Image (cartoon, grey):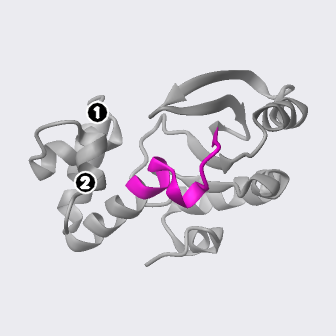
Amino acid sequence: MIDFANIDYLKSGSLKQQSVFKVLTNTKILIKLSEFDALLAGTYPIDIPIENSDLDIICFWENKQAFTERLKQLFENEVSFKIRESTINEAETVIANFSSNGFAFEIFGQNIPVKNQNAYRHMIIEQKILEAKDESFRREIIELKQKGYKTEPAFAVLLGLKNDPYRELLHYKI
């Protein structure tokens, strides 16, 4: 299993993953957000991005206001910077979006340790599924995503999951 806490795996990955490694290294974004246990999640780590995929950085905050202020301090001058608060799965959430170095970024923070957040849990399960399936499965996921499916619903379609794909994926047995 890949150690997603250390981005070195991206160096020897696909060309897209190698580009992400360079951007993360050059911007030092994970270092800048290290006090919040920042971790790259989503489609790039498991190598199923499409053209408009963003870099999802998940974070754990203990003080929402301090996290929000730090995001503003670090990124408010980036292109298309926006920050908002929401409630996702009954958890207070802060989300910042911006563009930098040719990539769209989404910083997602909750008062939940990153490895307990659904984004991380989904990624781990999706990686295990991809490892258990053949390359054509990966290509089918990417094709569904190109047709407008989000990642979890794309997996649900191919796996035959019938209800809420976000919940069902968390309980999927490989």
- Density class for disc 2 (Cα within 10 Å; few <14, some 14-19, many ≥20) is few
Q: Residue furthest right?
A: 73
* Span of residues in magenta: 109-122
Assign a secondary structure to mark 2.
helix
Q: In the figure, 56 relative to 81: above or below?
A: below
> Residue 37: x and y, percent?
71, 58
Instruction: Report which quarter residue 153 is drawn in.
Output: top left
Label 1 amino acid?
Tyr
Task: From this view, report whether residue 110 is shown above or below residue 98.
Answer: below
- Circle 2 is placed at which residue position? 139
Q: Position of residue 28 (x, y in %)?
A: 82, 55
Taking depth in this image into account, of 72 and 132 the one nearest to the observer is: 72
Looking at the rendered structure, the kind of residue marked 2 is Arg
Quadrant of the rendering where the N terminus is positioned: bottom left
Depth check: give the residue in front, 158 or 58. Answer: 58
Give coordinates of residue 73: x percent, y percent: 90, 33
